[in-house]
Amino acid sequence: MAGRFVTFEGIDGAGKSSHIESLAQWLRGRGHEVLVTREPGGTPLAERLRELVLGEPMDTLTELLLVFAARRDHLERQILPALARGATVLCDRFTDATFAYQGAGRGLGADRIAALEQWVQDERQPDLTLWFDLPAAVAAARRTAAREPDRFELEDEAFFARVREGYAARAKEHAARFVRIEAEGAAADVWQQVVAAVAAKGWW
């Protein structure tokens, strides 16, 4: 039986990364094989491309092509083999992030991203997307307290407001697989929303 592909999305500082491991432990406790991975990244090649995307100055189209190059390697070497053997894949970001960050945030628009999405992914989409949503100002305060910023995290609040709008547009377009998680509250409350969203699918 093919496994399930679950993605975690949201602007930097939304708290999604702290819940992905919790969900992995929750599923493993029920006897499931789980692969936790991330984008850009997930393979040695994709991790090297991640370093370039997050650290090196480049134009938006170059950034987009590197993200999809990393995604192709990630799909072929990690995600698709794991799904084929029946594992659950939990991925910290996937193509919705590209539409939100490069499309809405950078202003690239959706057409070229959609063409690459179809070409690179062979129609492969997540089975469930958990969108951790909160205001850009709240996310900015969390980022400042958490770590040294990368090239994206140095962007201003207006950039992240556009990214949030990009996520909202994707959630509307793909309502069947998106679940909005109200991420502004306490971690325990956010976790309960995650569990409820997963349990409602009845897959595990």
Image (cartoon, helix red, strand yellow):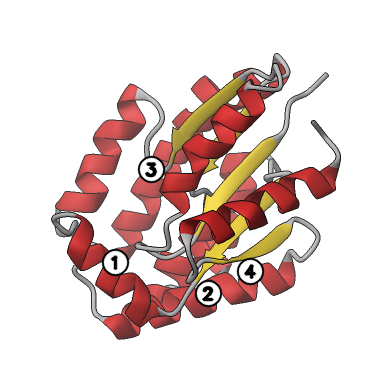
Q: Which residue is mark 4?
A: 170
Q: Which residue is mark 3?
A: 40
Separation of marks 4 and 1 at Cα, in angstroms: 24 Å
Q: In screen coordinates, is 94 left or right of 14?
A: right
Number of the front mark, 4 or 1: 1
Mark 1 burial class by Cα count in 10 Å: few <14, some 14-19, many 20+ = some
User: In the figure, residue 171 lies in which quadrant?
Assistant: bottom right
Q: Secondary structure at mark 2?
A: helix
Q: Earlier in the sequence, mark 4 or mark 3?
A: 3
Number of the front mark, 2 or 1: 1
User: In the figure, residue 3 lies in which quadrant?
Assistant: top right
On-image quarter of the C terminus = top right
Q: Earlier in the sequence, mark 4 or mark 1?
A: 1
Asked if labels 3 and 2 touch by Cβ distance under 8 angstroms, the answer is no
Which residue is at 60% across, 75% downward?
A: 168
Separation of marks 4 and 3 at Cα, in angstroms: 19 Å
Which amino acid lies under the numbered mark 1 shown in the image of this protein?
Arg
Asked if labels 1 and 3 touch by Cβ distance under 8 angstroms, the answer is no
Mark 3 burial class by Cα count in 10 Å: few <14, some 14-19, many 20+ = many
Could you say which disc has been placed on residue 142 in the image? 1
